[in-house]
Image: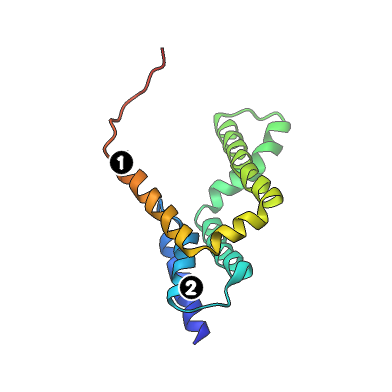
């Protein structure tokens, strides 16, 4: 029975990871609904590892370009594609830094937040409200004076 629950949570992860909603929050709620007490951090890591593998397969050409861009740049190639890939390398590095900082310095606090089901519901609710409000905001270019 636990295998079936794990598969269901894997489906939840797959369906929610690429939507602008919290896949981790939905996994916590799903585990509670299914009375699946085994997950823990290792289970979540493996679910996210599956997501990573899917990303690597789908975006393998783009990732290959990003991985080799620094070497091409250092060897003297300065094409627009190389510079584009280098820019994406920088974006990836910058986006990972906050997660590293949180993982190093606030690991216990984050784990506690993810075990507090009412807090998870509240955060999902707040995120939903923000998404609804953002859909009603005017679009266009903002200029600062």
**In this view, 97 is above or below 75:** below
Q: Position of residue 47 (x, y in %)?
A: 55, 67
x then y, percent, for residue 94: 62, 38
The image quarter in which residue 138 lies: top left
Residue sitting nearer the eye, 90 or 13: 13
According to the picture, the residue beneath numbered tag 1 turns out to be 133
Q: Quadrant of residue 21?
A: bottom left
Q: Which mark is residue 118?
A: none
Quote the CA–CA distance across marks 2 and 1: 29 Å
- The colour scheme is rainbow
Label 1 residue SS: helix
- What element does badge 2 sit on? helix
Of 57 and 94, which appears nearest the observer? 94
Residue 13 in view of the camera: no
Please give the name of the residue rendered at 52% of the width and 84% of the height, measured from the top-left corner. 2
Task: Tell me what residue is drawn at x 54 percent, y 49 percent.
Answer: 61
Q: Please identify the quarter of the rendering in which residue 70 is found.
A: top right
Q: Earlier in the sequence, mark 2 or mark 1?
A: 2
Quadrant in which the C terminus appears: top left
Q: Residues within 10 Å of mark 1 (few under 14, many from 20)?
A: few
**Residue at image location 64% in from the left, 41% down from the top:** 93
Mark 2 crowdedness (10 Å alpha carbons): few <14, some 14-19, many ≥20: some
Label 2: which residue?
31
Horizontally, is 82 left or right of 9 in the view?
A: right
Residue 62 visible in rendering: yes
């Amino acid at each position: 029975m636990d295998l079936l629950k794990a598969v269901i949570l894997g489906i939840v992860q797959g369906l929610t990871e690429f939507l602008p909603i919290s896949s981790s929050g939905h996994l916590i709620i799903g585990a509670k609904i299914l009375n699946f007490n085994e997950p823990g951090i290792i289970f979540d890591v493996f679910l996210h590892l599956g997501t990573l593998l899917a990303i690597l397969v789908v975006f393998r050409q783009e990732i290959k370009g990003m991985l080799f861009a620094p070497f091409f740049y250092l060897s003297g190639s300065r094409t627009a594609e190389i510079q584009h890939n280098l820019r994406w390398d920088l974006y990836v590095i910058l986006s990972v830094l906050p997660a590293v900082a949180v993982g190093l310095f606030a690991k216990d606090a984050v784990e506690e937040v993810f075990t507090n089901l009412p807090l998870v519901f509240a955060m999902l609710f707040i995120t939903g409200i923000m998404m609804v409000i953002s859909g009603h905001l005017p679009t266009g270019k903002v200029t600062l004076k």
